[in-house]
Image: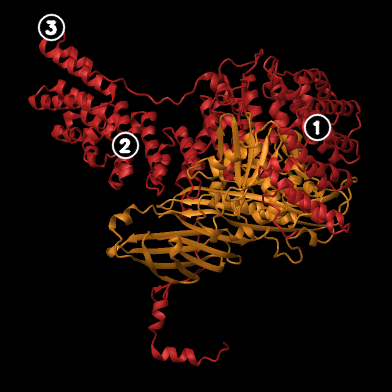
Chain colours: A red, B orange
């Protein structure tokens, strides 16, 4: 029976026979067999086979009493928890056994029993749990592990009996303010309180005094990594500095934690420091250096964590005009083996970091990616180049467009399509520049296959028709295919046709418009498109018949007006940014959305008022050390920095070169490495030699 | 708070489902299977549906899915960090194989009970403490756990989406790489009493562009420590980092000086300079961070066994171990002509092991005609690359490769032009060589209770440099 697979669906009767047959022969080897049978129960619960397993409750109770083995106990508790969550009243018979375990001397068993009590939504279990927790808290001598689970289990009990937990808030306050308590229990109490305050709608956010916070921070050397992370997480917005010195003191304590190897600790320290920066007027540059270095080192973590860090870098770059981190762009160059989600995020970082100094470097990289084998990636790179051109102003746009024009010659259709699309945006941002490139773009008219690029192409032809002598022919290709186009392309064909006609009311264009109107008003099902066609049709006919009402100038104004220059808007709302900065490292930092949008019940965190709160984030001054040396020294320092950067950028492999002591030159001819075929074609003499070799077979 | 931890087989069979929150619906397991495991187009390691968030990682090897479920604005950093540690512990107990896990899944439950506090708050992830709290000892020694963890990192970082360079990963599997020391093998249990082995591991990553300019170069380093001591000891050591060697002056975090050192370092580029500018270091939790901050002294009480004591990151003034130059020219008949030179730049008396260069060839290549001055080079059609191997590569030596591809008949000029040209990559391992020039200046072991008596210990130190991603574009 033990050779049966454990992880498979069984009927209750099958497992029961397993359990009983072994029970009869009371030999030692039956212990393992019995465990096998019990494991089958858990496996079946995992598989969702509840209906059958419920039947086995009496058997479980029996084994619970006779076995002392921890694994058996664990199975029993898990069974009761799983079934109890579904049918709370049904498992009440397990109460004596649970109580028994609760009173045992084994700490692990006690914790297990408490967890079971807490997990079942039935008042008898809940009462028992409360009683146990109260005795634990009152009896100061209990072990830290047990105390901690007692404190944490209040979080779950809160869902069953909210009022009763609320009466215990004072007790929790007492625990974490207790100076002689166990540090790890203090943190547990703080975390529990913090979560309770966060969960409960009508409870004000938790607040603790600066002195208590400093006491708690003083505990850090005695805490393990997860407690440190919890502590720092809870302190954000909970402690509000009243003077600049408060903030500086706390920053000084937390700074070393930035170097912790646990990502959570490092990131939470960063969050806490960034939070405190709202309550100081200036910080030393070394703090900025340490924040930046800390976050960059985290980039060598496994990809999932790397992804999180990159998202948070975006967050830090977005939240402040002058970011509190200084990052070199080369960290965000995409590596060939990066998972796609990291590549995407790195691209976003590059986009945000771009300025006139870093542009050449970044453009070089993006050009590389544009020829990447991953289609998505190369499209995104092209798009990023286009966005950079729009973001960085006319001069930078020149360089970007040069790159795009180079890529155009590369000639792969998805790249070309993307270039067409971004080129429209560039033209809208800088209407008077790049006219010489328009013709080059239009040559690729056949490549425009996707709706977006078709739209862009139509727009370009329409707005720069004065540069294109054959614009009507080009446009007619689209017109003749209008039936098979998507809705938005149909819209833009209509709009453009009208514009052409208004500019140059020639019979040829009139005919074209009429054909379009006929088709759009009779054969098209979409009401919006149909009404738009009717609208234009009437407009044109009014302007023809009643020139006194609608002069050609007015008509032109209506149909072919000036377009506003577009701006790329990467800035989020101030309040959202403030909230995001208080949520570094959390789920919302990955999505960069306000907490309320993702978690509807969550409270929004915001900066609390204090005499030293900065009204504007930009007011934070970053000062270099050695102020008394005066500005003269600073400039030389900056110069050095510039030189250094330049040198670094231009450093090549050759700088590291040194003469080789030994140079192996190529000898002989190139040979095929997979030359199985040629072996047969060997000279007969060689074959002979091979056979005559004295070798053991 | 993590509300549940789920472990699935690679195909999506739910094997462990530990609910920390009783109100969580059991069907949550099916949701993840449908939305992520069975879905082909997932481009992110996190998924939020409604207000339920799934964080997940995959184990190296069989690729089990280790998933956490949470329903609040969870600390993602802690969640992923925990999932990684949990996956490592599963591996230590050999539970990272579906077959074993299906038999011994109760061990996974016990692990979760040990590592997570009631309510779903991670509380303990230190392998030594976990193992001492467990009823069963793991199948692998803690050293292997960690080596495995490192391998996991390499695998996931290089091959999470398509194991592109499987042959490049072998170096990571050498557990800690300690085995060459006279009698200190990688296994902590075989150390004699009062021995400390310190391994400085560095992996250098570099990206070189077509014209030979270095786009980025950095070293991720770490110091591993294997300890076996009688009684409690306090260890202390110092490095030649630029900040601690300039202790004479008043301010330790003086940016001016560090910039100056950078300046001077620059002039003496790739000379063996005296100090190293550590951009950032991270320490194991036994190190007193306050003390390091104040005096730049690394002081700690080491736990028994192997730990990763510190990690650091260096970007300035590196010693590059290899120079690779390449000329890749398409010729007539759609062939591609390769001329590659590799030169070792480290001192002549050292040698590198397992030097492997992977040279990608255009798609549609049938064969390559190769001539190399040394080493062994083969064309691997299944990987679309030539692989050039040296078992041993001496310092200051130059070797050349000349090769030409044999394309299929239907290869077009255009296909060659559009070939994305993945970079040439290099893999190697060099012993007793540090890419950063980092040196442990002193290492003392003191009695914990009486700070003046020195502990009699045997101390070993070893430097290993290997390649991170060493890539050259052409």
Instruction: Please tell me which residue is depicted at 43% across the width and 40% down the height of the picture.
Output: A362
Chain ID of residue with mark 1: A
Q: Is residue A661 above or below residue A652?
A: below
What percent of the width, then of the height, locates residue A576? 54, 21
* Residue on which disc 1 sits: A117
- Does mark 3 fall on the same chain as mark 1? yes
**SS class, disc 3:** loop
Looking at the rendering, which quadrant does residue A263 occupy? Answer: top right
C-alpha span from label 1 to label 2: 68 Å
Q: Marks 1 and 3: which is nearer the front?
A: 1
Instruction: Please indicate whether residue B388 sits to the left or right of residue B187 in the image.
Output: left
What percent of the width, then of the height, locates residue B357? 49, 62
How many numbered marks, from 0 up? 3
Query: Is residue A325 something that shows in the picture?
Result: no
Instruction: Please tell me which residue is depicted at 31% across the width and 47% down the height of the picture.
Output: A412
Q: Which of the two labelled residues, at mark 1 and mark 3, occupies the earlier sequence position?
A: 1
Q: Marks 2 and 3: which is nearer the front?
A: 3
Q: Residue furthest left?
A: A507
**SS class, disc 1:** helix
Badge 3 crowding class, 10 Å Cα cut-off, few under 14, some 14 to 19, many 20 or more, is few
Dot label at residue A548: 3
What percent of the width, then of the height, locates residue A85? 72, 33
Chain ID of residue with mark 3: A
What percent of the width, then of the height, locates residue B75? 64, 33
- Does mark 2 fall on the same chain as mark 1? yes
C-alpha span from label 2 to label 3: 46 Å
Q: Which of the two labelled residues, at mark 2 and mark 3, occupies the earlier sequence position?
A: 2
Decide which of B266, A529 is in the foreground and name it. A529
Instruction: Please tell me which residue is depicted at 38% across the width and 41% down the height of the picture.
Output: A379
Q: Which of the two labelled residues, at mark 1 and mark 2, occupies the earlier sequence position?
A: 1
Instruction: Please indicate whether residue A262 sits to the left or right of residue A171 in the image.
Output: left
């Amino acid at each position: 029976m033990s050779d049966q697979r454990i992880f498979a669906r069984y009927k209750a009767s099958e497992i029961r026979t397993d359990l009983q047959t072994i029970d009869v022969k009371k030999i030692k080897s039956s212990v393992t067999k019995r465990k096998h049978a019990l494991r089958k129960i858990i496996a079946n619960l995992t598989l969702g086979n509840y209906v059958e397993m419920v039947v086995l409750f009496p058997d479980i109770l029996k084994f619970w009493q006779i076995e002392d083995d921890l694994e058996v106990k664990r199975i029993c508790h898990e069974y009761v928890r799983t079934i109890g969550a579904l049918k709370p009243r049904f498992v009440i018979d397990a109460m004596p056994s649970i109580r028994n375990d609760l009173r045992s001397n084994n700490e692990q068993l006690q914790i297990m029993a408490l967890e079971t009590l807490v997990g079942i939504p039935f008042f008898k279990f809940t009462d028992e749990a409360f009683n146990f927790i109260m005795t634990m808290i009152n009896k100061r001598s209990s072990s830290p592990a047990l105390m901690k689970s007692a404190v944490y289990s209040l979080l779950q009990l809160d869902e069953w009996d909210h009022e009763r937990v609320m009466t215990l808030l004072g007790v929790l306050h007492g625990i974490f303010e207790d100076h002689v308590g166990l540090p790890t229990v203090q943190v547990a109490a703080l975390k529990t309180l913090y979560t309770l305050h966060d969960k409960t709608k009508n409870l004000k956010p938790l607040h603790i005094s600066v002195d208590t916070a400093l006491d708690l921070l003083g505990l850090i050397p005695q805490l393990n990594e997860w407690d440190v992370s919890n502590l720092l997480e809870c302190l954000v917005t909970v402690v509000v500095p009243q003077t600049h010195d408060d903030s500086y003191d706390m920053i000084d304590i937390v700074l070393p934690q930035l170097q912790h190897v646990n990502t959570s600790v490092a990131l939470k320290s960063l969050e806490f420091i960034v939070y405190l920066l709202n309550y100081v007027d200036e910080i030393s540059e070394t703090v900025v250096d340490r924040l930046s270095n800390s976050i960059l080192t985290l980039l060598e973590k496994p990809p999932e964590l790397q992804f999180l860090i990159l998202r948070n870098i975006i967050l830090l770059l977005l939240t402040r005009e002058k970011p509190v981190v200084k990052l070199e762009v080369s960290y965000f160059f995409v590596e060939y083996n990066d998972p796609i989600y990291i590549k995407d995020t790195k691209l976003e970082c590059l986009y945000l970091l771009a300025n006139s100094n870093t542009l050449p470097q970044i453009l070089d990289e993006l050009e590389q990616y544009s020829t990447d084998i991953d289609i998505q990636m190369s499209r995104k790179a092209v798009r990023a180049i286009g966005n950079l051109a729009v973001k960085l102003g006319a001069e930078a746009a020149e360089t970007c467009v040069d790159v795009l024009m180079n890529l155009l010659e590369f000639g792969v259709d998805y790249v070309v399509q993307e270039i067409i699309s971004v080129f429209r945006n560039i033209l809208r941002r800088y209407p008077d520049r790049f006219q010489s490139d328009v013709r080059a773009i239009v040559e690729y008219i056949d490549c425009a296959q996707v709706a977006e690029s078709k739209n862009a192409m139509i727009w370009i032809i329409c707005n720069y028709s004065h540069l294109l002598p054959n614009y009507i022919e080009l446009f007619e290709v689209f017109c003749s295919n209008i039936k098979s186009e998507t809705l938005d392309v149909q819209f833009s064909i209509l709009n453009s046709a009208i514009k052409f006609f208004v500019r140059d009311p020639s019979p040829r264009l009139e005919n074209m418009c009429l054909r379009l109107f006929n088709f759009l008003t009779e054969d098209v099902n979409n009401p919006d498109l149909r009404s738009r066609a009717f609208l234009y049709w009437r407009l044109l006919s009014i302007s023809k018949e009643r020139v006194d009402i609608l002069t050609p100038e007015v008509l032109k104004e209506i149909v072919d007006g000036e377009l506003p220059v577009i701006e790329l808007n990467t800035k989020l709302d101030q309040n959202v940014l403030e909230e995001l900065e208080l949520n570094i490292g959390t789920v919302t930092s990955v999505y960069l959305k306000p907490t309320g949008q993702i978690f509807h019940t969550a409270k929004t965190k915001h900066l609390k008022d204090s005499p030293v709160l900065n009204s504007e984030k930009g007011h934070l001054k970053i000062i270099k050390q050695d102020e008394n040396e005066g500005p003269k020294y600073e400039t030389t320092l900056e110069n050095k920095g510039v030189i250094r950067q330049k040198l670094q950028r231009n450093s090549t492999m050759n700088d590291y070169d040194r003469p080789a002591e030994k140079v192996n030159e190529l000898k002989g001819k190139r040979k095929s490495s997979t030359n199985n075929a040629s072996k047969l074609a060997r000279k007969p003499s060689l074959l002979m030699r091979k056979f005559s070799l004295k070798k053991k077979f | 708070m993590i509300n549940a931890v789920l472990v699935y087989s690679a195909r999506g069979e739910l094997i462990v489902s530990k609910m920390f929150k009783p109100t969580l619906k059991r069907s949550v397991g099916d949701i993840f299977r449908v939305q992520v495991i069975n879905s082909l187009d997932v481009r992110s390691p996190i998924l939020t549906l409604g207000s339920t968030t799934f964080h997940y990682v995959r184990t190296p090897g069989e690729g089990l899915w280790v998933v956490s479920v949470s329903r609040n604005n969870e600390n993602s950093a802690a969640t992923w960090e925990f999932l990684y540690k949990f996956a490592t512990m599963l591996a230590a107990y050999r539970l990272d194989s579906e077959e074993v896990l299906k038999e011994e899944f109760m061990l996974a439950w016990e692990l979760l009970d040990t590592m997570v506090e009631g309510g779903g708050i991670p509380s303990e992830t230190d392998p030594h403490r976990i193992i001492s709290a467990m009823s069963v000892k793991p199948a692998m020694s803690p050293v292997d756990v960690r080596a495995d963890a490192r391998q996991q990192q390499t695998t996931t970082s290089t091959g999470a989406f398509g194991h592109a360079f499987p042959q490049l990963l072998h170096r990571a599997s050498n557990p800690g790489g300690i085995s060459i020391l006279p009698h200190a093998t990688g296994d902590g249990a075989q150390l004699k009493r009062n021995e400390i082995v310190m391994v400085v591991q560095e992996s250098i990553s570099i990206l070189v562009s077509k014209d030979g300019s270095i786009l980025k170069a950095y070293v991720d380093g770490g110091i591993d420590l294997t300890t076996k001591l009688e009684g409690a000891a306090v260890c202390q050591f110092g490095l030649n980092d630029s900040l601690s060697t300039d202790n004479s002056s008043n301010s330790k975090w003086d940016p001016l000086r560090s910039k100056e050192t950078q300046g001077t370092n620059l002039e003496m580029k790739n000379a063996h300079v005296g100090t190293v500018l550590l951009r950032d270091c991270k320490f194991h939790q036994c190190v007193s961070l306050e003390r390091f901050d104040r005096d730049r002294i690394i002081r700690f009480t080491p736990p028994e066994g192997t730990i990763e004591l510190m990690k650091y990151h260096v970007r300035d003034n590196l010693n590059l171990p290899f120079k690779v130059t390449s000329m890749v020219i398409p010729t007539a008949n759609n062939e591609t002509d390769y001329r590659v030179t590799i030169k070792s730049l480290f001192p002549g008396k050292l040698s590198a092991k397992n030097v492997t260069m992977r040279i990608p060839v255009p798609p549609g290549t049938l064969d390559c005609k190769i001539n190399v001055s040394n080493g062994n080079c083969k064309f691997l059609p299944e990987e679309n690359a030539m692989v050039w191997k040296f078992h041993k590569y001496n310092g200051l030596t130059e070797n050349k490769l000349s090769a030409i591809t044999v394309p299929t008949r239907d290869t077009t000029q255009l296909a060659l032009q559009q070939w994305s040209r993945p970079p040439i990559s290099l893999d190697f391992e060099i012993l007793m060589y540090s890419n950063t020039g980092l040196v442990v200046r002193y290492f003392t072991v003191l009695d914990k209770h009486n700070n003046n008596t020195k502990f009699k210990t045997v101390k070993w130190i070893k430097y290993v440099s290997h390649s991170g991603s060493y890539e050259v574009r052409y």
